[in-house]
Amino acid sequence: GAGNLTIAGTLSEIGGTFNGGSGNIVSGNFALGSGTFVSSSGNFQLSPPGGNLFNVTGGTFSHNNGTVILNTPGLYLNSPIPSFSPGGAVLNNLSVTGQNYYGLNFASPVTLVGNFTNLLQQQSGNGQVYQQGYTMTVGGNFFSNFYGGNGTTILNGIGAQTVNMGASAGTFGNLTVNKSGGTVSLAGNVIVNGNLLIQAGSINLAGKTLSVAGNFTNNATPGLGAGTVNL
């Protein structure tokens, strides 16, 4: 349906089928163990007290072209770091918000066909999205204020994509561009602490600076446009 749904505690499914319709869903933590969960085509917002915010261990998650919003709790010293574990589920758009001393840990690979937006606000210099060595695949635009990229990020959209690290000193671990069409354009300076691989598609520096600490391999379209590359 088109109505909104608000759940004060954890939304957990262990069988059957849930259809979120087009209205917004707001809950605490989310857990899917079996059954089929069809998310909202609007927003599916999680505002939990902590722990594993989004945990898929079984069943089928259908993104329904909607947006998952992780509103991380305002945790401080000695609090457990909240985690995000979609398992093999594919999401459309993912947005991370909130004020969190420790940040957010990935606990599984993350695959998005849409946009990734990280608006997490740092506390005392901490508070990032940490990949924890997992691969993140993004088919849309990538925007992140603070991003601790210690895994591999793959940009694989079929059309134009932009990368914007905001005003932060956020970095990628390894970055791979593997696009069947379109160009990745930089909307700000980008730092890659590991390797950069352009497997297919292209990067347009758009006057920005791209810094790569590891290997830089371009197996695709030559040329990066106007800008600066630091190796």
Image: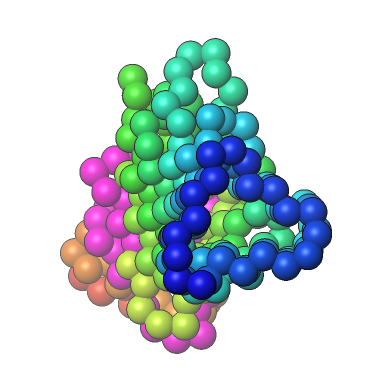
> In the picture provided, is 131 more to the left or to the right than 161?
right
Left of 1 or right of it: where is 225?
A: left
Q: Is residue 168 above or below residue 205?
A: above
Q: Residue at x 35, y 24 (%)?
A: 123
In the rendered image, which quarter is residue 202 located in? bottom left
Q: Is residue 222 visible?
A: no
How far across and how far down the image is residue 87, in percent?
A: 71, 55
Q: Residue at x 25, y 61 (%)?
A: 187
Residue 187 counted in the magenta span: yes
Q: Report the coloring of the rendering.
A: rainbow
Between 203 and 141, the residue placed more toward the observer is: 141
Regarding residue 91, the answer to whether it shows in the image is yes
From the viewer's perspective, is residue 213 above or below residue 223?
above
Q: Residue furthest top?
A: 78
In percent of width and height, residue 164 lies at: 30, 57
Residue span colored magenta: 163-191
Percent from the top left, x then y, of residue 140? Answer: 42, 70
Depth order, front residue of 183/99:
99
